[in-house]
Image (cartoon, rainbow, N blue to C red):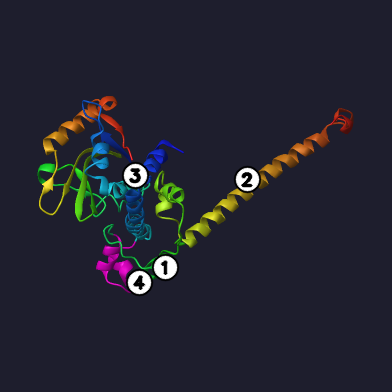
Amino acid sequence: MSGEHKFYDYIDEGGNNIIEDWLNNEGRSAKANFIIRIELLAASPPRGFVDSVWQYPYVTPLTGQWEGFVEIRVKANNNQYRLIGKKVDRDILLVAWGYHDGKGWNTADTPSTAKERVDQMLNNPDKYRRDHEL
Amino acid sequence: MSYKSDKLWENLKEKDFRDQFIDAHVDEGIAFQIRSLRNKKEQTQPEFAQELGVKQPLVSAWENPNYGKYSLNTLKKLAKAFDVGLLVRFVSFHTLMNWTIDLNPDDIAPLSFTAERNQLYIENQVNKILDDKNEGRNASAADSVQDVPKYQQPSTATL
């Protein structure tokens, strides 16, 4: 990664990387896409250049209850997989995930949980934050 | 290999993941490169579409990672429009992996030929100035040796 942007995963109280766990289980079929999308986003755009990629369709700013968060949306096996994070300057804190299987939206996380996780990552990065794992 | 390479290599041991990785690499990578290169060209989608003689929604589709239906002719046409090279090759997974991690912005949106030529020209000019400066310094150093009275010059026999 060239250091244009840096992605971090949320680590829970038990020391588990919830993003990595999800990508290795429910989100497994979208993992390759997420790896490549995140690496591309991390290297873009160079400082001082006009941004054309931190926006739809690569990243989507969320509205409503999720206002202030962004999502990375990936389509795989006819499902839509989403990683949700908070962009703080050039750091992206990944705090939640979900997928839509055509019938309904599946996620274990609520906006308030996500906000709480962001606060934890900002206030105690040594405990709650780890470099994004592939 | 770096820690990230090791992690990715572990994933690639699964055939399903390798297959997904090939699709993702093309679908995600090409879409992202087209958007980045068009941005570097400072053209809007309608302007770029007009240059290529296609409709704007097609440019929008090309830039979408879910599109994934690029023909070789389209890719060649795009490379020519951006004035950049195009590599379509079967490669080892290590090669593919190396293109995926630790990317630089120039890997994503490479310089057009004109920009590359200008950059090379500037680099050559800078190197020439530095060489001339060094030669000047060496020449003046040689002059200063010659200025020293002969009895103080080191004997070649001792060199």
Q: Which numbered dot is residue B130?
A: 2
**In the rendered structure, the residue with mark 3 lies on which chain?**
A
Q: Residue at x 70, y 44 (%)?
A: B135
Find disc 4 in the rendering and name its residue: B52
Mark-to-mark CA distance, 4 and 2:
43 Å
Pointer 2: residues within 10 angstroms few (<14), some, or many (20+)? few
Q: Secondary structure at mark 2?
A: helix
Of tags 4 and 3, the one toward the viewer is 3
Sequence-earlier tag: 1 or 2:
1
Three-letter amino acid code at disc 2? Answer: Leu
Q: CA distance from mark 1 to mark 3?
A: 27 Å
Of tags 4 and 1, the one toward the viewer is: 1
Would you call the spot at circle 1 few (<14 residues within 10 Å), some (14-19), or many (20 or more)?
A: some
In-image side of B153 versus B19 (left or right): right
Q: Secondary structure at mark 4?
A: helix
Question: Start and end of the magenta stretch?
Answer: B43-63
Given residues B141 and A10, the one toward you in this image is A10
Figure quadrant of the C terminus of chain A: top left
User: Which residue is tagged 3?
Assistant: A42
> Does label 1 lie on the same chain as label 4?
yes
Amino acid identity at mark 1: Lys
Q: Nearer the viewer, residue B137 or A40?
A: A40
Q: Earlier in the sequence, mark 4 or mark 1?
A: 4
**Disc 4 is attached to a residue of which chain?**
B
Residue under the image location 11 percent in, 35 percent down: A112
Question: Taking B82 as reference, is B130 left or right?
Answer: right
Tell me how far mark 4 sits from mark 3, CA to CA.
30 Å
Q: Where residue A4 sits in the image (x, y, percent)?
A: 36, 42
Instruction: Quadrant for residue B53, please give it.
Output: bottom left
Secondary structure that dominates the magenta span: helix
On residue B76, the disc is: 1
Amino acid type shown at disc 4: Leu
